Amino acid sequence: MTAPLFDSHMHTPLCGHATGTPREYAQAALDSGLAGICFTDHMPMPAWYDAPWRMRLDQLAQYVEDVRAVQAEFAGRLDVRLGLEADFHPGTERFVEEVLGAHPWDYVIGSIHYIGAWGFDNPEFIAEYDSRDLAGLYRDYYALAEGAAKSGLFDSIGHLDLPKKFGHRDPDGYAALHALDVIAERGLALDFNTAGWRKPVAEAYPAPDLTRAAAERGIPFVLGSDAHRPEEVGHRFTDAIKQIHDVGGRIVTYQGRVRHG
């Protein structure tokens, strides 16, 4: 029996770099035959951190209200859940913990978007890759992924191999496997993020070899399009399901921060 399909990674205009209303994302999901969605917009962070790319703390209540309105409108037709894409950035854990305690979230993704002060997935700062040792970069990145897993703040780790976004691939892979060991030990899931197929690397996160390695460790996957426009909802989910099932992987969802599936 096939589990109901959810898109559990999508954004809203409150993050400052997405278009379309939450209602339009929900309608797109309904039109594409999905059973449910979970909004996971970029959570507020301290004012000095990544401010242009996320909602402000004073917008959080509006976000919750917007999602609740969509839940009510689509009740009985589409299962709409409330989540966040949170950031793991050392030194901000207490702030994140307070935000996560403010509302009853269904699902929280833990993502790394910065190595130190460098927003490595931002196209504006792509030139920095030329100055970096790729093996060292990936070691630093996966050390942060391990920190995120150990923090106890998150349900899954977002777009696991994100530094490959512009085509800068991991030259050895050992740090990724070690991070997967920690993720498995801590009982987290992985965000299977189809947005990678829309990026220069043209490969989902995680890559097929990491998908296999995660499945071998018993780590489940949460499907997500990382939609920033309604037309991206459910993007290439058939391909995602195949990549996961080909290696014996398992797809799950979260509700009330409890895993299902």
Image: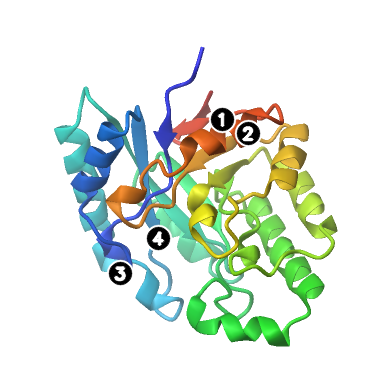
Mark 3 and mark 1: span between their CA atoms? 30 Å
Provide residue 16's location: percent of width, then percent of height. Answer: 30, 69
- Three-letter amino acid code at disc 3? Gly
Packing grade of label 1 (10 A; few <14, some 14-19, many >=20) is many
- Provide the residue designation for mark 2: 244
Give yes or no for contact between labels 4 and 2 (Cβ–Cβ under 8 Å): no
**Which badge, 1 or 2, comes first in the chain's sequence?**
2
Residue 183, compared with residue 140, is above or below; it is: above
Residue 181, compared with residue 16, is above or below; it is: above
- Provide the residue designation for mark 4: 42
Q: Nearer the viewer, mark 1 or mark 4?
A: 1
- Three-letter amino acid code at disc 1? Ile
Give yes or no for contact between labels 1 and 2 (Cβ–Cβ under 8 Å): yes
Q: Nearer the viewer, residue 248 or 11?
A: 248
Mark 3 and mark 4: span between their CA atoms? 10 Å
- Three-letter amino acid code at disc 4? His
